[in-house]
Image (cartoon, rainbow, N blue to C red):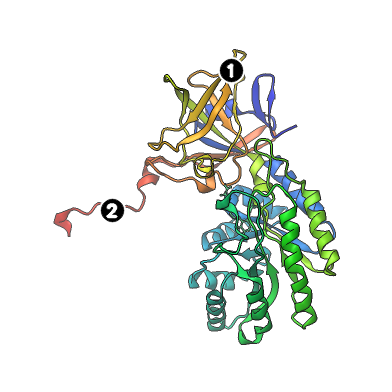
Amino acid sequence: MSTFHYVGDRLCVEQVPLADIAAEIGTPCYVYSRAALVTAYRSFAQALGAQPGLIAYAVKANSNLALLAILADLGAGFDIVSQGELERVLAAGGRPERIVFSGVGKTEAEMRRALTAGIRCFNVESAAELARLNAVAGALGLRAPVSLRVNPDVDARTHPYIATGLKESKFGVPLAEAIAWYREASRFPHLAFIGIDCHIGSQLTELGPFADALDRVLPEVLALRQAGLPLRHVDVGGGLGIRYRDEDPPSVTAYMALIKERLAVHGLQDIELILEPGRAIVGASGALLTRIEYIKETEERRFAITDAGMNDLIRPALYEAWQEVRAVLRRHETPCAYDVVGPVCESADVLGRGRQLAIEPADILAILDAGAYGFAMSSQYNARPRAAEVLVDGARFHVVRTRESYADLMRGERIVREALL
Ligand code: LLP
């Protein structure tokens, strides 16, 4: 049974009808299923099995504290890309030794904070970053654990905005260059080179690109080990896709089996394996609830104008992403095609085009598969307070982020009138 399912004509998550949440909390509102999150995390942990390693959830996909705490309690690690994500993980009870720090633009302050917190590894993406980390660690009298993010130059066959593994991308270091740096590790007395990593893109729906990347990187790891550099781990990044519409991504089991097989082929079956899944852990566990404010018919089209817009969920506008739209109350009239659009003053403010729906004004819609890169990418554009977030647990639900108020919108701002200058 999928996470969001009809019981009679009412769309439910776990044992809670979504209409109850919309009535009590209001809309727009993100809803997450604890059970779905736990199941998705466990599928990775179980597939990892006896292999030493870590499932480091990519916090950028959804950084709500309640979700992070659930994952921390399950023993998850975390892949972070900013000090903000680090503070969130620590506040949620995540253990520093299970945190890896990715990203191309780490500041000195971020490095200091992560070093003193004692994180597991920095995924370094340039020569300049390596030098900076060496200096920052030296000044603190510490040795920074480092993995170089290599760019294996493979085509992830995904949307160009979320493909990161081609050589023209800003991410990673060319493999040959990285190998040279590993071999000169002694030039960096305050760094400990403990691993290697690569992340080739997101929403991958085939195993081929993952295999290509591994087959480029793993022989180098073996060579470095044979040359006496004690690399302890391989971090394969994230990127496993989910089914939004008719995609057919590999299962977590098949994905993990491929990785383990490639490790074995390259004689590295004993190495620690780190994964950084984001979307595949949290994507299907969440939906965005929105209310239809108006139905508007023009000569050309029929629009359902909702109270959620591109500021709440930007994926359709930014990537032309398709996410399923379902009516929270199923009506039995004949459906018609609607463009589901938000209230934001931009033509790109579309949540779904040409959707077959039987709806009336004031009905509630659920945009599915919105757990990843939904709330996390939301903004206050058009001075719209950000949505509430709700966690469902069995027959109960809890607000895990209060809807922003109008005071929240203006927090920190000052009016400067001429007389005061
Ligand atoms: N590790 C690194 C270094 C990453 O850059 C990313 C995602 C991940 C892990 C997690 O990837 P995942 O397992 O979630 O595919 N906003 C876009 C996706 C951007 C992904 C950015 N990096 C979207 O909504 O589709």
Picture layout, residue 216 above or below residue 372: below
Name the residue carrying label 1: 335
Whether residues under marks 1 and 2 lie with C-beta atoms below 8 angstroms apart, the answer is no
Q: Residue at x 56, y 26 (%)?
A: 355
Where residue 332 sits, quadrant-wise, is top right
- Asked if residue 215 lies left or right of residue 329, the reply is right
Q: Is mark 1 within 8 Å of ligand 1?
A: no
Residue 298, position in %: x, y? 42, 20
Q: Earlier in the sequence, mark 1 or mark 2?
A: 1
Name the residue carrying label 2: 414
For residue 271, the mark is none
Position of the C terminus by quadrant: bottom left
- The kind of residue tagged 2 is Arg
Position of the N terminus by quadrant: top right
Q: Count of labels shown? A: 2
> Which of these two is toward me, 219 or 145?
219
Q: Mark 1, residues whose alpha carbon is within 10 Å: few (<14), some, or many (≥20)?
A: few
Is residue 418 visible in this depiction of the protein? yes
Q: What element carries label 1?
A: loop
> Which of these two is toward me, 96 or 312?
312
Residue 234, position in %: x, y? 73, 67
Badge nearest the viewer, 1 or 2: 1
Residue 286, position in %: x, y? 62, 39
Picture layout, residue 208 above or below residue 16: below
Q: Which residue is drawn at 49% across and 73% down?
A: 108
Q: Is mark 2 on a helix, strand or loop?
A: loop
- The kind of residue tagged 1 is Pro
Q: Is mark 2 within 8 Å of ligand 1?
A: no
